[in-house]
Structure formats: structure tokens, C-alpha cells
Image: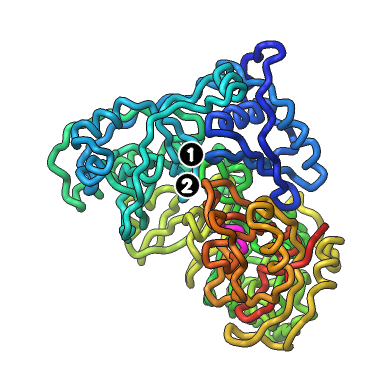
Amino acid sequence: MTSPSAPSEGTRLAAPRAVHRAGESALLAEYPDTASVLAAAAAVQALDPPHLVDLVPAETTLLLSGTAARDLDSLRALLDHLPAPGEEQSAGTERSIGVVYDGEDLTEVAELLGLSPDALIAAHTGATWTAAFGGFAPGFAYLVPGDVPDASDVVSAQTDGSGSPGPPWDVPRRAEPRTAVPAGAVGLAARYCGIYPRSSPGGWQLIGRTEAELFDTARTPPALLTPGTRVRFTAQRAVSRLSATTSALARARSEAAAVPSRLARRRGARAVPLEDARPALEVLAPGQLLLLQDGGRAGQGAIGVSTSGAFDRGALVRADVAVGNSPRAAVLESLWGPVRLRALVPTVVAVSGAPGTLTVHRTDPEVGELELEPAEAQDHAIALDPQDVLVIGPPAEGLRRLLAIRGGVRGVRRTTADPGPGASAGASTGASTGASAESGAVLGSLSRDTLSGLGPAPLEAGDVLLIGPVHGLDAVPDRAPGPTGAERESEQEHASGADERSPSAAASSLRIRVHAGPRDELLGSEALDALTSTQWTVRGDSDRIGVRLDGPALPVPEGAGSLPSEATVPGAIQVPPSGLPVVFGPDHPSTGGYPVLAVVTRAGLDLLAQAAPGSTVRFVPAD
């Protein structure tokens, strides 16, 4: 990070109003206004502490995520003694965005604000907007009107209580959200302005549209509007709209023209270029859901990108170590199964996660088939010869099984009948039946984020997995090392249920450790006591975004059911107005407006990754 100019001697930012623990290794700091949040974020970013993993500003809070619980004291002390950022750091980037003001809700919004449509456009283009924080989708920024003061103004405002300036733009969301809002739509809601980076459902009031590209993974940074960026909107003349087909073709031509430069940037950023990877396994049958996952995308929360990565991190480490990979290398994450794969070259694989059978159909009849029972199949390196077929059976209990391949997965090659205008990106020459397109890392990770859609799409039959070089890797151990102390502690708390599981069967009972906060004081001790005294049941609509629980509704005090959007972490137990808790998984939204009562430990989240529908869960205090 670029170091700012030195602040005036003795000039410091006021300490946060309050600091709450947010799980094992994160803190949530409260500030009086958005300007104070952005000033604190700029100061922390300038100091660039080595143990800081992520820094996520929101409307009135700042989330700091460390590497471990031992970092909490130093992060807390850091917040109490932040120097005011210098001019270079506080100035921020400025963007000018052209808008065609022909939104479907323009007239209605003008009436709500007591303005004519022309006066609304003049007010919108006359204001300087500031990106306060990201969320909802990668590249979506919540813009607030009015300039964010410089460092000296923030110090003054914190002293006299004046806060940050800005006219009111309080516009209610639509009573009925739209099922599809087009990419580039400019909308207003509550006190914010926002631009949809992609087509998605939404309830904001639409006043116009822009051609600006809000999010591009080949760009650094990928988000056009990062926290602190100032934005001025300029009105563009409304011309006759292009037909959907013509518009799509124009966008395709633009994207195709950008392919060479994007490829150069992407290949330059890879530790192992995709062209150096080699085919290893072909997917014959993917089961219910087969994803690529690795250690995830840390440090991207400020632009609306969650960490993602393997749900069961302990299983990721054990599978990778079993084949000699680094412990965060990409693996296959299978939901339910069974999965069938064909080896294309000699290779070594290992399976971890939920226990289940493993079968290898050998091409050499003299070798014979290999059939392993659940206890034998776990964390055990298995050599495959070309054309051997590996069958990963469905879990005997639990949900997810992870397959590591020696060399680590580097990408996936897909064959499509019609590659489309943009398929040349990373593509190699295909067979006569179609083009072969290769997908690699996105923002430094192969993980598929099921909420945002980042990362390679779910694997399908015919997909070929590409692996990296095996030279320089650790030797394959006789047996993968056992679980860590935290994992062993969690396993001792895990009381197994029936021997065999299916999606409809009753599942095991889990004891999950949690840290109270960050909003336990807001929701009250009664809600926390109810959380830890209730036996909860995992619902069938749980997924990688969140594990949804059934049981008696938690008591939610009046006025505590919602709060200004603030950053969240994996394992956060969010309490919506229904009172039924949701435990955020790795693909959770980066910010949310419901209070978080407690946060599950990392080892506890590994257990929840294997909690099938019908499993029962009890939360116990970690402290």
C-alpha cells in the first residue's frame, strides 16, 4: 500500500465509540458517522499492519479481521491511537460517471422528494457522492451525498459533535422488488445511491442508467468505486435505445477487443500460468453439486467480495497434505455425490471431509479393483493410472467430500458447442465438436462463490481438471496427519447419529462453540441465553451462503431487528425479524442489516459444513 504524507504532529483520530468482538479473530468498531469510518479505514490502511487480513468499512462501523485470536489486543490498541491520514490518503479517487436519466421510477422519486424530474436530475448531478462501503454484490457501492471531510475536518467534527454534512435523500425502497434489474441501472434507496454492477433482483428506485463497468476482475482494483471514492454524475442525452440484440453485440465486441490486454494481466498475476497446467482428471458424473474450492479470497470484503473457499477448511488441509500439496491448494468439493472421475495421466489423489466409500475401477485387470470402506478412504493417498475410474460414494454421514489431486487444481477445461464471442479468453484450440475454453483463478482464487458467481462454474460431465507441476512438492506421507487441537476438540463434541445418511434422513447432533457478539448487547441476554439453551434443527434450504435453523424464535427487542448495514464474517449468527437464526457460510454477503448475536468458531464452522438437513445443533459459549 502507498504510504500517505505524514499527519500533523499530535493530530489523531478520536477512538471509536465502542469496539465489539466479532468471532475468534475480528473486531467491529463503531463510529459516529461515515466520514469517521472512512478516515479510520484510511489510517489503518496506511499503517498496513502485517496481521490484518481484511478491513471492511460500512455506514457507521469498521471491521478489522486478523489472522488469529492473538491479534485482537493489538488491533484494539491500534484503533485507540490512529494518526489522522495525510492529504494524499484522505483525498480519495474521483470518478465522473455519465448517466441517461430515463429510469422507470424517475417521476415517482421526484414526487417523493417534492421535486420536478428536471430538478431531481439537477440535484443528483450537482451533488458530490462518496462511496461509503460495498456490499450486496461485487462492485456495488453504497454512495452517500456530500463531500467526506478531510482529516482535519474529521478531527474537528469528532470534537464538536457536528458529524458529516450532506442533504437528505431519503427514498423508500419499492414495495415490490423487481425480479430483474439490468446491469448499469442507477437507483436510490434509503439515503443511498447505487449502481447495479450486473443484472439481479432489486428493490431500489431506478432513475437512470450508465454504461460504466462497475466490476472487472482483470482490473486493479476490480471495483470501479472503492470506499472513499468521490463520484460526480453527468447527464447524458437520451438517445433511442439500442435493441437488446444490438446492445449485446456491441458489448461483446468491446469485451473481445479487451481480451488481449486482460489475458496479459491475468497471466502475469498467476503464480503458475494456466498454460503450464496439464490435464489430470475428466469428470464423468458430478453428482448433485461439484465445485472447485481453495483457501478463498481474503481481503476483498470492502468491494463486496466474500472470502468463499472450502466450507470444511480442516478437510481441505488434510486432503492437500495427504498428497503433498500446500494446505490451501484448490480441491473438488462434492455435495452428496456420487462423483465419477477418469484419470488421464498417472496421478495421486486423496479424499477428506464426510466419510464415505471410495472405489477405483482399474483398467489393468491384473491389478483388480480397489474398494475402500469409509474408515479406510479418509485422508489416504491413492495412485491412479491413466483411464482408471474413481468413484467417490455419497457420504455415510455429513454432506461434503473433498478431493485433492497432487499438483493442485489450477483450472478447468470445458468443451462447448458454441463458444460465443468471449470464449477465446484463455481458450485453447478445441475439437471439431466445439471449442475448448479454460477457466482459471479469479481474484487469486479458484473458489466458486455461489452468491456472487465468481470463480469457475459448477463442474459438469466432460470437464477436464488441470493441475500444476508436481516437482518441488512434499513427499506423499504414509498417512495424512490427524486433526489439529481445535479440530480434535470439536470432534470430541460431535456425537454421531445413525450409520448411514441421506438427504431425507435424520442426521447427527452437533455441539458448536460460539463467541458472543458483536450485537449481543443490542439483542440482550435473553436472546443469547435462548440461543445457547435451544436445540436447533438444520433446515433443508441451507447452503454455502448460510445454514438456516428451525426452532423457537429468539426474542428480538423492539427496534433491534435491523440496523445500518455492517460487515459480517463467516460463522456470524444473524438474527432476522423472524427470530430464526442463520449461520453465515463462506459465500455470505459481505455486509448485512440484521444484528449478529454470536459468531461460530472456525472449527465449529467445519462441523456445520457437514450438517445435513435434520441435524440438530446446540451452541455453547467458547469463553
Q: Nearer the viewer, residue 312 or 332?
A: 312
- Crowding at dot 1, Cα within 10 Å, few <14 / some 14-19 / many 20+, comes out as some
Nearer to me, 368 or 464: 464
Choose top left, top right, bottom left or bottom right for residue 73. top right
Give coordinates of residue 511: x percent, y percent.
76, 71
In the picture of the structure, the residue carrying the numbered disc 2 is 138
Q: How is the image coloured?
A: rainbow
**Residue at the (57%, 51%) spot, across then down:** 306
Q: Which amino acid type corresponds to the residue marked 1 in the rendered image? A: Pro
Give the quadrant of residue 527.
bottom right
- Picture disc at residue 169: none
Which label sits on residue 222?
Answer: 1
Gap between marks 1 and 2 measured at Cα = 9 Å
Residue at image location 73% in from the left, 68% down from the top: 532
In percent of width and height, residue 444 lies at: 58, 45
Marker count (numbered): 2
For the record, the magenta segment spans 583-588
Report helix, strand or loop for mark 2: strand
Residue 63 in view here:
yes
Q: Is residue 489 above or below residue 11?
A: below
Horizontal side of residue 412 vs 408, given as left or right: left
Residue 429 in the magenta stretch? The answer is no
Amino acid carrying mark 2 in the image: Pro
Image point (45%, 26%), residue name:
165
User: Looking at the magenta stretch, what is its main secondary structure?
Assistant: loop
Upstream in sequence: badge 1 or badge 2: 2
Q: Position of residue 385 (x, y in %)?
A: 67, 72
Q: Are marks 1 and 2 in contact (CB under 8 Å)?
A: yes
